[in-house]
Image: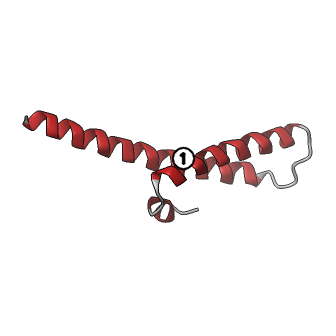
Amino acid sequence: MKAKDLRERTTEHLVELERTLAGEVFQSRFKNFTNRLNDTASIRKARRDLARVKTILTERAGISEGQTQAAEDKA
C-alpha cells in the first residue's frame, strides 16, 4: 500500500486496517517460527504497511491536537 492511498481513507477504516495488519504480522511471525511460512518477505511488507498506517493515524491525531491547542491559545 502506498501512503498516498492510505491518506485518502477514513480514520475508522485505518484503525480497522491497523488491527488487521497487526494480526497478519502476528500470524506470519508465528508461521515463520513453526517453519510453515514460504514467503518470509510477507512479514516485512506487513510490518511496513502497519507502520505507514500508524504514522498516518499519529499525524491525524497531532493535527487534531494542534488545532485544539491553537484555539485554546487564542482564547
Give residue 29's quadrant in the image: top right
- Residue 39, given in percent of the width and then of the height, sits at 82, 55
The reply, left or right, for residue 23 in relation to residue 49 is right
Residue closest to the far right: 35
Q: Quadrant of residue 65?
A: top left
Viewer-proximal residue, 40 or 52? 52
Identify the residue at image location x=73%, y=47%. Answer: 24
Q: Residue at x 20, y 36 (%)?
A: 69
Q: Residues within 10 Å of mark 1 (few under 14, many from 20)?
A: some
Q: Does 65 sit left or right of 48 as displayed?
A: left
Residue 41 vs residue 13: left or right? right
Amino acid carrying label 1: it is Val
Count of numbered labels shown in the rendering: 1
Find the residue positioned furthest to the front: 12
**Residue under circle 1?**
15
Q: Quadrant of the C terminus?
A: top left
Quarter holding the N terminus? bottom right
Q: How is the image coloured?
A: secondary structure
Q: Is residue 10 above or below residue 68?
A: below
Estimate the x, y position of residue 41 in percent, counting from the top left. 75, 54
Question: Toward which corner of the image does residue 74 lie, by quadrant?
Answer: top left
SS at badge 1: helix
Is 27 placed above or below 3 here? Answer: above
| Horizontal and vertical percent position of residue 48 | 60, 50
Which residue is found at the position 54% from the left and 46% from the top?
A: 15
Which residue lies at the image location 66% right of the left edge and 48% below the top edge?
A: 20
